[in-house]
Amino acid sequence: MVPRRPPPRWFSPAWPTGPARPVSAAAQQGSRRRLLLARATRQEVIGLYRRIFRLVRKWQAASGQMEDTIKEKQYILNEARTLFQKNKNLTDTDLIKQCIDECTARIEIGLHYQIPYPRPIHLPPMGLTPLRGRGLRSQEKLRKFSKPVYLKSHDEIS
């Protein structure tokens, strides 16, 4: 009989293991909820990614020109890949929900207007009324808060 070798050093835990601490039912329920929420958001994100690729297969440019259709399809694919890669490491559920809402809004607007590019907003400089205080900083802050959902990530990339 061959004697058993001890496990390699990298395999051993960094701290001594002792008896497991009892976990309350509320803690188990909270961890289950987080796990289910993570699964649901993951499935939703993957579903959106698939929806974008299905949309690209059927996409036709409003002008009817083949070269415009190819350019718009390529733009949609590049935009989707860039944004999904940029946001792949997000862990905050609120940020993930914002990204999901932005993606859904951009898909719906693109389908409705037959334009893959985000619709620009036109706000005249110093056109927003500050609630209190004056100056350029308050105007910049108001502009940031008044930006539509579908343009949140557009300025960060371009």
Image (tube, grey):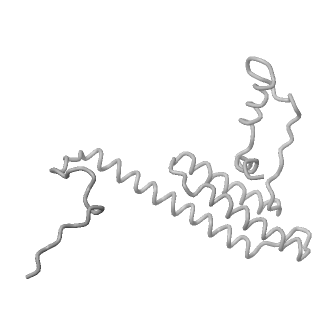
In percent of the image, x 83 and y 74: which residue is there?
Answer: 70
Q: How many circles with numbers are drawn on the protein?
A: 0
Q: Name the side, left or right, on which 95 lies relative to 70.
A: left
> Is 152 placed above or below 126 here?
below
In percent of the image, x 22 and y 67: which residue is there?
Answer: 7
Q: Name the side, left or right, on which 145 lies relative to 93.
A: right
> Is 95 placed above or below 114 here?
above
Residue 22 on image: x %, y %: 19, 47
Q: Name the side, left or right, on which 45 lies relative to 140.
A: left
User: Which one is nearer the viewer's eye here, 90 or 124?
Assistant: 90
Q: Name the side, left or right, on which 95 lies relative to 134.
A: left
Choose top left, top right, bottom left or bottom right for residue 67.
Answer: bottom right
User: Which one is nearer the viewer's eye here, 157 or 70?
Assistant: 157
Residue 142 on image: x %, y %: 75, 31
In percent of the image, x 41 and y 51: which residue is there?
Answer: 34
Among all residues in the image, which is located at the extreme bottom?
1
Among all residues in the image, which is located at the extreme left?
1
In percent of the image, x 73 and y 30: which residue is there?
Answer: 141
> Is 110 placed above or below 150 here?
below
Residue 81 on image: x %, y %: 67, 64
User: Which one is nearer the viewer's eye here, 34 or 90?
Assistant: 90
In which quadrant will I find the N terminus?
Answer: bottom left
Residue 151 on image: x %, y %: 74, 48
Among all residues in the image, which is located at the extreme top?
133
